[in-house]
Image (spheres, rainbow, N blue to C red):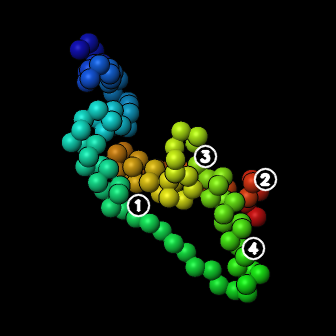
Amino acid sequence: MTGNLFSATLDGNEFIWTGTNRAEFYRYLRDHVPIISSAVWAWVHLCATPQSYTLSGSEAEKRNADAILAALEKRMLENPLVRRAGIAHLTEQFFLELFTTGRFCGELIPLPDGNGD
């Protein structure tokens, strides 16, 4: 320990505390301390339960809205390394970050061209 730097190693992974990286430190603890990881994931899974929605309107309007929502679900939070995508994964990531650092920032752009209308 020198100055205001602190270094710790867990399972061969080193973390260096600089005094300004509190969120990074919390993520490090969540990812490397099993009891913390288990507690955070328990709360995430309790809060990110399966979701559903209902549509109202004519059958044509419902089909159109369903197609738009299905396209949004495919585009949202795309990650080839993660099996889940869409609202379910976004909700899980929201709660994971919220219970780890106490904050979350995200943006949802509903249309592929990004205009949001």
Query: What residue lies at 33% left-to-right and 27% top-to-bottom?
Result: 19
Percent from the top left, x then y, of residue 101?
Answer: 36, 45
Residue 10 rendering spot, x and y as whole percentages: 25, 24
* Front: mark 2 or 3: 3
Residue occupied by mark 2: 113
Which amino acid does the dot numbered 2 rest on? Asp
Q: Residue at x 50, y 58 (%)?
A: 88
Q: Quadrant of residue 14?
A: top left
Residue type, numbered disc 3: Glu
Q: Residues within 10 Å of mark 3 (few under 14, many from 20)?
A: some
Mark 2 vs mark 4, foreground winner is 4
Task: Name the N-terminal-most of marks 1 and 4.
Answer: 1
**Element at badge 3?**
loop
Q: Which residue is mark 3?
A: 78
Identify the secondary structure beneath mark 4: helix
Say if mark 2 contacts mark 4, CB within 8 Å: no
**Distance of label 2 from label 1 (alpha carbons):** 29 Å
Residue at horizontal 58%, vertical 49%? 77
Question: Within 10 Å of the Cα at label 4, are there few (<14), some (14-19), or many (20+) other Cα atoms?
Answer: few
Depth check: give the residue in front, 52 or 5: 52
Residue 29 % position (x, y)? 29, 35
Q: Quadrant of the C terminus?
A: bottom right
Q: Residues within 10 Å of mark 2 (few under 14, many from 20)?
A: few
